[in-house]
Amino acid sequence: METDLKALFGDIDIYLFDQLLKGRMTKDMRILDAGCGSGRNLVYLLQSGYSVVAFDRSEAAIAEVRRLGAKCSPNWRDEQARVETAEQLSFRSESFDFIISSAVLHFAHNEEHFEQMTDELWRVLAPGGRLFARLASTIGMEEAMPPLGDGQFLLPDGSRRFLVNEERIVALVERLSGQLYEPLKTVIVAGKRCMTTLCIQKQN
């Protein structure tokens, strides 16, 4: 019988799917989807009984996630999805074992805002926990992305984003006293933007 992969996995980030295949996320972990949007990375986790909490700054997105949760999980509670911002979280410190941050950090307004978001995510990550982040960068397309100040860059597709380079990522990992548990991976998308996968583990 052919498996309906779309129904099983939704529109999951392929690099997050890679984390699942490698056993980086397990059902005994407390998982946070930080900046979850409408829940594209939650379908498999919810249907498979993972312990998941999600937040987003958009009320409409959280309403959608709550509908998704009720559909996918018999044990769903609406308080598992909250309207919050990454720079000011209500969760207790060291609450989660695995944090997903997919296409969120490059919406930082400036360096200070970027550090506020990363510091908060790191605060709620438990010792030994992992932060999986996908964010836009300049890696591989440095000459095509003119700086606009405050860490903002103009992308070839006309959008404006807060971008990091490899040096900035290394500095971030060092400042957090974490370690990369996967090598950095960057994909150039049609010559218009670069997306880097950052996987950091917190020391025990």
Image (spheres, grey):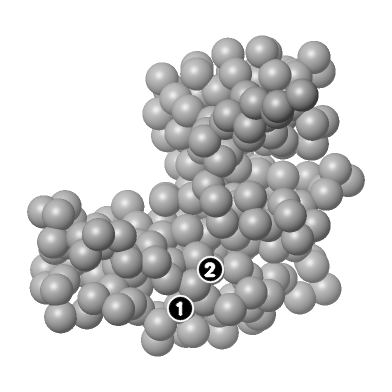
Q: Residue 48 location in percent, x, y?
A: 79, 31
Residue drawn where x is 65% and y is 26% of the image = 4
Task: Between label 1 and label 2, give the one nearer the viewer.
Answer: 2
Give residue 22's position: percent from left, percent from top. Answer: 75, 60
Q: Relative to residue 46, is residue 181 depicted above or below?
A: below
**Residue 77 seen from this side:** yes
Reading the image, the residue beneath label 2 is 198
Quadrant including the N terminus: top right
* Image quarter in which the C terminus is found: bottom right
Is 19 situated above or below 77? Answer: below
Q: Amino acid at mark 1?
A: Ile
- The answer to whether 78 is drawn above or below residue 87 in the figure is above
Q: Position of residue 93 (x, y in %)?
A: 71, 54
Q: x and y percent of residue 61 in the render? A: 44, 25
Mark 1 falls on what kind of element? helix
Question: Left or right of 84: which side holds 77?
Answer: right
